[in-house]
Amino acid sequence: MEKNVILNKTYNFALRIIKLNKFLNKEKREFTLSKQILRSGTSVGANAEEASGSISKKEFRAKFFISYKEARETHYWLRLLRDSDYIDKKLAESLLSDIEEILKILGAILKTVSNK
């Protein structure tokens, strides 16, 4: 198991988002919002993974900043899905809790790297 906390959390979150996308497509027949949440929700981890392979501090910061922005967008789509009753409150709150934790970690990473 990878020891990098943010990579683990974003990977596991992406798996949850993929399952959410399948649910929205199959059960709710919702294709527009589900595509948006799939794109942004999986991009968070993809950009964090790219950051871990950066060759410079500037590239590292840029990739984590993109990851942070994608996490903010994902937070928006989750709230929209919850408030439009596409997903129930319990599922929404669980996913929102995960993305808020990820946002805090990404924010701390960006703050640390910006102060150096």
Image (cartoon, rainbow, N blue to C red):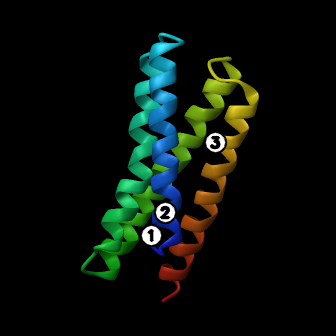
Element carrying mark 3: helix
Q: CA distance from mark 1 to mark 3?
A: 22 Å
Sequence-first tag of 2 and 1: 1
CB contact under 8 Å: marks 3 and 2 = no
Q: Label for residue 113? A: none
Identify the secondary structure beneath mark 1: loop
Residue at image location 55% in from the left, 48% down from the top: 72
The residue to which callout 3 is attached is: 95
Q: CA distance from mark 2 to mark 1?
A: 9 Å
Q: Are marks 2 and 1 in contact (CB under 8 Å)?
A: yes
Instruction: Check disc 1 and report the residue beneath it.
Output: 1
Residue type at mark 2: give it: Asn
- Identify which amino acid the numbered label 1 is placed on: Met
- Residue at which label 2 appears: 8
Give above or below for 113 relative to 85.
Answer: below
- Closer to the chain start, of discs 1 and 3, is 1
Left or right: where 68 falls relative to 52: right
- Residue 71 in the image, given as x and y percentages of width and height: 52, 50
Alpha carbon separation for disc pair 3 and 2: 15 Å
Residue ID at (48%, 33%): 19
